[in-house]
Amino acid sequence: MLWSLFKIILFVTAIALLTLGAGFLMETEGGIRIAIGATEYNLEPLQAVIAAVVLVVAIWLAIIVLGLIVAFIRFVNGDETAISRYFDRSRERKGYEALAEGMIALASGEGSTAMSKASRAEKYLHRPELTNLLTAQAAEMTGDKRKADEVYRRLLKDERTQFVGVRGIMKQKLAEGDTETAMKLAQKAFALKPRHTETQDVLLGLQARHNDWSGARKTLGAKLKYGDLPRDVHKRRDAVLALSEAKGVLNEGNDIKAREAAIEANRLSPDLVPAAVMAARTYIEQGKPRYASRVLVKAWSAQPHPDIAAAFAEIVPDETPADRLVRFRALTKHRDGDPETRMLLTELNIAAEDYAEARKALGDLPDALPSQRALTLLAAIERGEGADDQTVRALLARAVTAPRGPQWVCENCNHVHAAWTPICDGCQGFDTLAWKPAPETDHAMQGGAEMLPMIVGAADAGDDTAELLDPDDGQEDDVLEAELLDADATPDGDASKT
């Protein structure tokens, strides 16, 4: 209400002022004289004001007309105008619609449709950084590798899409099995985008596959730097790479550098069994048995393993079974309930011909957690205590078909390895091996054949008899029993693997 009143007052005031101004101009004497050549115009003050307003309006209209003429000329010449922008928006809308339909077709598995939509989108949009990627993926889906390679190479020419092009060609080379070229492309992609997690993983795997351990450690450091890897996982994998580097250097004959790398690997990950064993043997060669013992005890505390016991035995290779049993208490006092610790104590007591202690150490392991090694140890104990042939035969028959016990097994594909390796032979996974019970496959058992001299006597337990313990060789159980029972039953204390 007040605003309406205010507008009315303002309007009346404006009219009053204009009226006063017009009256003032009409009463004013004089005027404006305009001479154009021989013609002269005399305008009174009011007429002069009206003429000025008309002149301003005329100039404004002239400017508008001139702008329309200029816009028409620019449109004819192809310059951007309101009209051209209208048509551009129409083409852009059609292009993005085609691009969206192409992406939907790609997600639906319709490669040919996606390629045609990508071609239509490029016709309207002229945005190769978008349409080329869609075309390349659609070409891969339809199996047209040549077209995909051609498009990826076009992407290399643009800095914005160079990484996409390198990555696409890298994947093609990996699919073709050309790992050398793929590794070079992975290095290029890593240089373009060092934070890209997939590229880091691909490069790390290829470097490990080609034994480029130094380069792999740098890539692993980049993963830690950019926050793509927890620090504890980094230490573990860095230790694996350091150990692999040590083995490579050792094969090249550089013993000193290999020793340093082995010790570094053990420092990074004390629970890595192969690193602990290699570092301990390095200390043994250097005449530092205390350091070797310390490394192995720490590794055993984290993960009991037969290789650790074997390396611990190498510290004093010529000791008697009784002395070895005493010295091994540094290991066996740790993880005393672990099956590996119990079997190690059993072997040591068998070597010392203390079968009562061996049976006590083994306990109910053959029944609670039967394995070829545990049952073979029990057969050795029975043989040492003078059990009849039927008892020993029954235990050996159970050992033939019992599980093999822990082995180096890939946690990704369950591929069983005879020895630890940084790269799985089955799935090419990096640092995927774990010491655990393996699925039943065609692999030899761990630690069973070494006990044959204890059971049948060292003289008659040759390679042929050892092979009979493997049920995969096609022999019947009665042949195995006949071979074992025909041999001498006197145990040999020095035949223990430890």
Image (spheres, grey):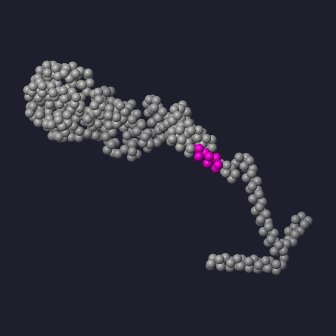
Residue lying at the far right of the rendered structure: 38
Image position, residue 284 (x, y; %): 21, 32
**Can residue 444 be found in the magenta stretch?**
no
Q: Residue at x 21, y 19 (%)?
A: 464
Image position, residue 96 (x, y; %): 59, 46
Majority SS type along the magenta span:
helix
Image quarter of the C terminus: top left
Camera-nearest residue between 85 and 442: 442
Q: Residue at x 26, y 33 (%)?
A: 407
Camera-nearest residue between 181 and 451: 451
Q: Residue at x 79, y 77 (%)?
A: 22
Which image quarter: residue 394? top left
The answer to whether 68 is drawn above or below residue 120 in the figure is below
Image position, residue 493 (x, y; %): 12, 27
Q: Is residue 91 visible?
A: yes
Which image quarter: residue 291? top left
In this rendering, the count of numbered labels is 0
Q: Residue at x 46, y 29 (%)?
A: 176
Seen in the image, is 350 located left or right of residue 475?
A: left
Seen in the image, is 437 located left or right of residue 320?
A: right
Seen in the image, is 2 located left or right of residue 77?
A: left
Image quarter of the N terminus: bottom right
Magenta extent? 89-99
Which image quarter: residue 429? top left
Image position, residue 134 (x, y; %): 54, 40
Camera-nearest residue between 172 and 193: 172
